[in-house]
Image (spheres, rainbow, N blue to C red):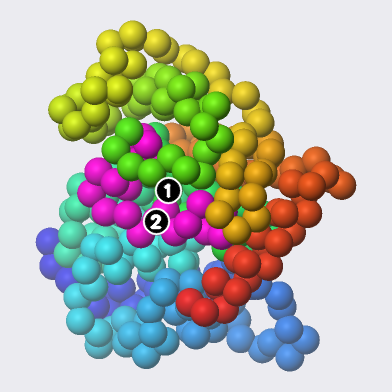
Amino acid sequence: MTFDRASLGAFLRARREALQPEDVGLRRGARRRARGLRREEVAELCDMSADYFARLERGDGPQPSPPMLAAVARGLRLTPDERDHLFGLCGYSPAQRGAGDHVSPGLMRILDRLTDTPAQVISPLGETLRQTPPAVALFGDETAFQGHARSAVYRWFTGDRSLYLPEDHDKQGRFLASALRTAGPLGQELVDVLMRESSEFATLWNRHEVGLRWSDTKRFVHPQVGRLDLFCQSLQDPDQAQALLVFTATPGSESHGKLDLLAVMGTSFKTMS
């Protein structure tokens, strides 16, 4: 497969002009004249410089790497088919795009409207694919992990659990081991690694528990705001086998006030990034 710069530029331009500010959680200013989004807006959504995106759109940029194309696909809210097409224009096969890590436009539109709420999209292996700023304030930047540590299941059995109430640790471990079984062959490598590295996981895995359900209530101990009792609602995307997790609190409760504080903290994180 060859790198088709001209077709790539035309495709990026068409997708940018088809997007409206409301599609990505931006406000439409009274003086906006641009058809669709501006290049600078798309570049920010893709976590790249405006000059780099402009070169790609003009057709005179270098061949983007697969991670860069994944960022472009997220920023432009491409469907899985459109993402495969994007990779093909740049000379990559669909297999090189990274199965299961592309968030659907529908989930992204919902996430864009939850800027003041902890929410994140996770894969079947518990990999956090996207987070709102308040979710980063609550959990830390879980998208920054690499390798097996991308999975919350791996981190639970090999890392720090201090964010979770100690009384819930046993139940959380059983739930995560049970949930990993639903990943099927996709999770086999992770299972093999954890069987070697965690005797606790090996014990739970050998129980063969399937379909355990966790209560909608999650209890956390945050280093800045303290105890949080939150409700976790899940929205499933059957096509991508991903889930959008949204964390809320009872209005008027102490935890609700602490969520407001996390929203402020998340805004400061976004400003600094």
Q: Secondary structure at mark 1?
A: strand
Rendered location of residue 266, percent (x, y)? 60, 66
Question: In the image, is residue 197 above or below residue 211?
Answer: below
Task: Work out which quarter of the rendered image holds the N terminus and state it.
Answer: bottom left
* Crowding near the residue tagged with mark 1, few <14, some 14–19, many ≥20 C-alpha atoms within 10 Å: many
Count of labels shown?
Answer: 2
Quarter occupied by residue 74: bottom left
Determine whether label 2 and label 1 are within 8 Å by CB. Answer: yes
Q: Amino acid at mark 2?
A: Thr
* Residue sitting farthest toward the right: 252
Rendered residue at 13%/67% (across/down):
2
Identify the residue shown where x is 65% and y is 60%: 262
Residue named by callout 2: 143
Is 96 placed left or right of 267 in the picture?
A: left
Q: Nearer the viewer, residue 183 or 4?
A: 183
Q: Which residues are magenta?
A: 136-156
- Residue that numbered label 1 is attached to: 128
Helix, strand or loop status at disc 2: helix
What's the amino acid at mark 1?
Thr
The image shows residue 243, relative to residue 66, as above or below, that is above
Residue 261, x across and y down, in percent: 71, 61
Where is residue 159 drawn, in percent x and y?
Answer: 33, 42
Residue 24, quarter of the rendered image: bottom right
| Residue 175 covered by magenta stretch | no
Q: Is 250 or 125 nearer to us in this picture?
A: 250
In the picture, the disc for residue 174 is: none
Q: Residue at x 30, y 69 (%)?
A: 68
Residue 170 visible in the shown view? yes
Give the residue drawn at x 29%, y 23%: 201
Does residue 266 sit above or below 214 in this rendering?
A: below
Q: Nearer the viewer, residue 6 or 62?
A: 62
